[in-house]
Image (cartoon, rainbow, N blue to C red):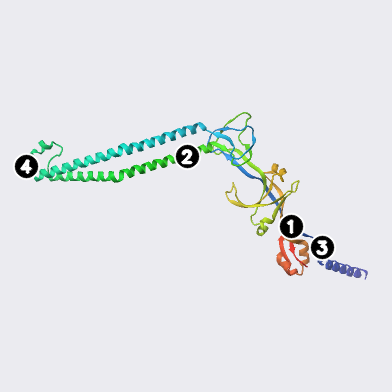
Amino acid sequence: MLSSCSKETVDDESKLIEKEAFVWSWRDFEKSNEISLQSLSVDIQPKRSLEVKSEAAGILTLEIEGNVNTVSKDMRFARMDVDSLAEQRERLTIQEEKRLLEDMRAEKLDLPEQKRLAKEELLEARRKVRLLELILENPAMEEMSAELFGGDIGAVSDASLKEARDALSLAESKVAWADEYDEKLRKGQLRLQEMDFAESERTYLQAKDRSVYTAPFQGELRLEVEYVEGQTEYTVTARETIATLNDYSEIHGLLKVENAAWINLSPQRLYLQLRDRDRTMMPFSDDRNVKDERTRREERFYVFSVPLSEGGSLRRLTGTQMKGDLIYKLPEHCYIIPKYDLSLYALGKSDSVDWSEMVAELWPGAKVIAEGLSDVAISYHP
C-alpha cells in the first residue's frame, strides 16, 4: 500500500511539473533591437592591398631607403632598365625621321618620275603604231623603213603592228594606273607605316610606364626583394613580386556569403562583432565578388569595415582569420526567444518545423523577424 501511494504521488508531481513547464509568459523574455545570427571566421584585411610585380627580368633600382616605407599616391619608389629605354626612344626617333623622308621622296621624286616615264613610254608606243600603220598602207616605204627609222620598229608586218598596238594598250594602262592608283598606294603605304610606328611607340610607352614604379594609392610599402641595407640595385625575374602596398586607412572584415541563411536580410542592418580585446563592431560596407587566386573562381563576400582610428589594434592582425559574431540590427524591438523554449512550448500544439510557421500557429499576429543560431526574434504585441 505504501509503495502504491508513493508511485501515485510521484506521477502526480511529474504531471504538475510538466504542466507548469508549458506555461508561457512573454514577460519572461527580454526585448532587444538586435540578435546574434551566427558565429563564424572572418578574414581581416586592409582596405586595399596590391602586389607590385616586375613586368620583365632586369635590374631594379630602388629610389627609397628602408624595407618599409609610408608612401603617398603617385610617389615614385623604383625604376628599371632606363638605359635600354633611351635606346628605344632614339630608335623610334630615327624611324620616324626615315619614314617622313621616304614619304617626301616618294611624293616629290619617285611618283613624278614614274608618271614621266609612263607618259614617255605611251608616246613612244603611239609613234611606233603610227609608223607601222603608215608603212603598211604604203608598201613602197617598206624598203626605206630600216634607213628611215633604223632598227627600232623591227620587221614590218601585221604581226608587228599587233604587237605594237598591244604595247600601246599596256602603256595607256600604265599611265591610267599611275594617275589613279599610285597616289592611293603611296597614301596606303604611308598609313601602314604610321600604324606600325604608333604600335612601336605604344610598346615603348608601356615599357616606359612599367620601368617606373609609382604608388597608385597612399599606404605602407613593404619591399619583397631580399633587401640589403645601402644596396639600391637588385636583379629580378619576370613577374616577380618586388613590393606589397597596403592601405590601412580602414580595416576590413571579409565574410564569405555562399548559401547562408541570413542572405535575405538587409545587409545594411548587419554588423560584425569581432572577438578581439576591444570587441570591435564593424558595420556593413560592401557586397563584393572576389576572385580566388587558386581556383580562379569568383566568390561572393560581404565586406565590413572600421576606420583605423577605431580599429588600430586590428592592424597587426591583417592577413589572418579570427572569430566573430554576425549581428542583425532589428527594425523594431523584438522578443528574443531561445529556440529550445519555443520548441518545448510547441510540443503538442504545432507540428511545423519552420520557425515562422510555428510562431504564426501558436500566436496569430506574431511574426519571426530574424532567426539566429540559438534564438529567434519575434515581433508580437500581446
- Reading the chain from its start, which is encountered first: label 4 or label 2? 4
Q: For the C terminus, which image quadrant?
A: bottom right
- Reading the chain from its start, which is encountered first: label 1 or label 4? 1
Please say whether residue 301 is visible from this viewpoint: no
* Picture coordinates of residue 60, whole percent (x, y): 56, 33
Q: Is residue 20 left or right of residue 283?
A: right
The image quarter in which residue 159 lies: top left
Mark 2 residue type: Thr
The image quarter in which residue 242 lies: top right
Structural crowding at the residue carrying mark 3, measured as other residues with C-alpha within 10 Å and reported as few (<14), some (14–19) or many (≥20): few
Q: Residue reaching furthest left?
A: 140
* Picture coordinates of residue 61, whole percent (x, y): 57, 32
| Disc number for residue 140 | 4
User: Do the CB atoms of the residues marked 1 and 2 lie less than 8 Å apart?
Assistant: no
Q: How far is disc 4 from disc 3 in space, using C-alphas? A: 141 Å
Name the secondary structure under disc 1: strand
Name the secondary structure under disc 2: helix
Q: How far is disc 3 from disc 1 in space, using C-alphas? A: 18 Å
* Picture coordinates of residue 152, whole percent (x, y): 15, 37
Residue under the image location 25 percent in, 39 percent down: 116
Q: Is residue 103 left or right of residue 336?
A: left
Name the residue carrying label 3: 28
Q: Residue 67 versus residue 71: which sits nearer the camera?
A: 71
Structural crowding at the residue carrying mark 1, measured as other residues with C-alpha within 10 Å and reported as few (<14), some (14–19) or many (≥20): many
| Disc number for residue 34 | 1
- Reading the chain from its start, which is encountered first: label 4 or label 3? 3
Name the residue carrying label 2: 203
Q: Is residue 371 above or below residue 301?
A: below
Q: How far is disc 1 from disc 2 in space, using C-alphas? A: 57 Å
Mark 4 residue type: Ala
Name the secondary structure under disc 4: helix
